[in-house]
C-alpha cells in the first residue's frame, strides 16, 4: 500500500510539470512505467504461449494505453480551456481599455468646454485694467494686445457692451450632451450643477446690463448723461459674478481631473 502511494505520488508530480511539447514523451514514459509496475507486482512472468496469459498481457497493455490516452486527452483539454480563458481575458482587457479611453476623451472635452466659463472674468479684468481706475484697485500693468482706453472711449457705453456681449457669446458655446454627462461621478455632477447655476446667473445679469446700456446710448449721451465705466457699480458687481463663475469652473475642472485619473490608472 505504501509502495502504491509513493509510486502514484511521484507520477502526480510529473503530471503537474508536464508541458504541451512533452506530452508524447510523457505518454510513452508513463506506458513503460505502468508496464514495469505491473510486471513487478506480478508473482511471476506469465508465459506468452498460453491463451490465458496472452489475454492477461493484452488486458494489461489495453489498460495502460487507456490510462495514457485519458491523461493525454485531459492534458490537451486543460490546455485548450486555459488558452480559451486567456484569450477571453485579453479581449476583456482590450474592451475595457477602449471603454476607458472613450470615457477619458469625453471628460477631457467637458474640461476644455468648462474652460470657456473662465473667459468672462478675463475679459472683465482686462476691461478694468484698460480704464483709468476701477474704484477699488490700481490700474496695474498694461495687458498685451489691449491698449488702455482714453478718457473719451471709457465713457462710451458701447465699448462696455462689446465686452459683455463677447462674454455672452463664449457662454453660449458651453453645452454638454447627456451622453457625456453619464461619465461623471457624484463629485463632478455636484460641481457641474454649481457651474451651471453660475452661468445662468451671469447671463441673466449681463443681459439686463446690456439692455440698459444700449437703451441709454440710443437716447443720446447728453440725455443719458456721461458714463464712467470705472464708477459703474453694476459693472463692478458683474466682475465679481464673473470671478465666482471662474471659481466654479475651476472646481468643476479639478473634479474632472480626479475623475480622469481614475480611468488612466486603471
Image (cartoon, rainbow, N blue to C red):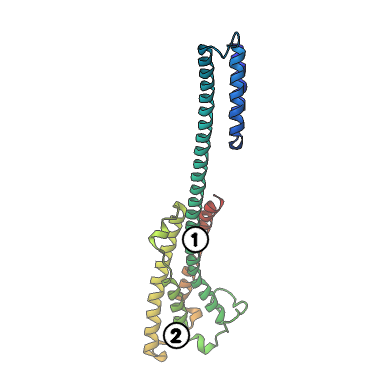
Disc 2 versus disc 1: nearer the observer = 1
Q: Is residue 178 visible?
A: yes
Q: Is residue 155 left or right of residue 145?
A: left
Between residue 199 and residue 176, name the one nearer to us.
176
Q: How many marks?
A: 2
Whether 254 is drawn above or below 26: the answer is below
Quadrant showing the N terminus: top right
Residue count near mark 2 (Cα–Cα under 10 Å), binned few <14, some 14–19, many ≥20: some
The picture places residue 160, in percent across and down from the top left corner, at 47, 81
Q: Please, which residue is most extreme toward the top here? A: 43
Residue occupying image coordinates x 56% and y 81%: 130
Residue at the disc numbered 2: 158
Residue at the disc numbered 1: 105
Please tell me in which quadrant of the rendered image residue 161 appears. Answer: bottom left
Residue occupying image coordinates x 51% and y 79%: 230
Mark 1 element type: helix
Please tell me in which quadrant of the rendered image residue 209 appears. Answer: bottom left
Whether 96 is drawn above or below 218: the answer is above
Residue occupying image coordinates x 44% and y 85%: 158
Whether 178 is drawn above or below 144: the answer is above
The picture places residue 185, in percent across and down from the top left corner, at 45, 52
The picture places residue 122, in percent across and down from the top left corner, at 53, 73
The picture places residue 11, in percent across and down from the top left corner, at 60, 23
Nearer-N-terminus badge (2/1): 1
Between residue 82 and residue 57, name the one nearer to us.
57
Between residue 11 and residue 112, name the one nearer to us.
11
Amino acid at each position: 500500500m505504501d509502495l502504491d502511494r509513493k509510486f502514484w505520488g511521484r507520477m502526480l508530480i510529473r503530471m503537474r510539470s508536464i508541458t504541451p511539447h512533452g506530452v508524447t514523451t510523457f505518454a510513452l514514459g508513463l506506458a513503460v512505467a505502468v508496464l514495469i509496475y505491473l510486471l513487478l507486482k506480478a508473482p511471476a512472468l506469465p508465459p506468452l504461449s498460453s491463451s490465458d496469459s496472452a489475454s492477461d498481457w493484452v488486458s494489461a497493455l489495453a489498460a495502460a494505453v487507456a490510462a495514457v490516452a485519458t491523461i493525454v486527452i485531459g492534458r490537451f483539454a486543460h490546455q485548450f480551456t486555459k488558452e480559451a480563458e486567456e484569450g477571453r481575458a485579453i479581449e476583456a482587457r482590450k474592451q475595457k481599455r477602449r471603454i476607458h479611453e472613450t470615457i477619458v476623451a469625453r471628460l477631457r472635452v467637458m474640461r476644455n468646454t468648462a474652460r470657456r466659463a473662465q473667459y468672462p472674468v478675463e475679459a472683465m479684468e482686462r476691461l478694468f485694467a484698460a480704464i483709468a481706475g476701477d474704484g477699488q484697485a490700481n490700474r496695474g500693468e498694461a495687458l498685451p494686445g489691449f491698449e488702455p482706453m482714453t478718457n473719451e472711449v471709457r465713457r462710451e457705453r458701447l465699448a462696455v457692451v462689446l465686452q459683455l456681449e463677447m462674454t455672452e457669446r463664449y457662454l453660449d458655446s458651453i453645452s454638454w450632451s447627456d451622453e457625456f454627462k453619464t461619465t461623471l461621478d457624484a463629485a463632478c455632477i455636484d460641481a457641474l450643477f454649481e457651474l451651471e447655476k453660475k452661468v445662468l446667473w451671469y447671463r441673466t445679469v449681463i443681459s439686463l446690463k446690456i439692455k440698459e446700456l444700449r437703451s441709454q446710448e440710443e437716447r443720446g449721451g447728453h440725455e443719458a448723461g456721461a458714463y464712467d465705466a470705472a464708477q459703474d457699480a453694476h459693472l463692478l458687481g458683474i466682475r465679481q459674478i464673473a470671478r465666482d463663475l471662474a471659481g466654479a469652473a475651476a472646481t468643476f475642472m479639478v473634479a474632472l481631473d480626479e475623475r480622469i485619473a481614475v480611468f488612466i490608472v486603471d
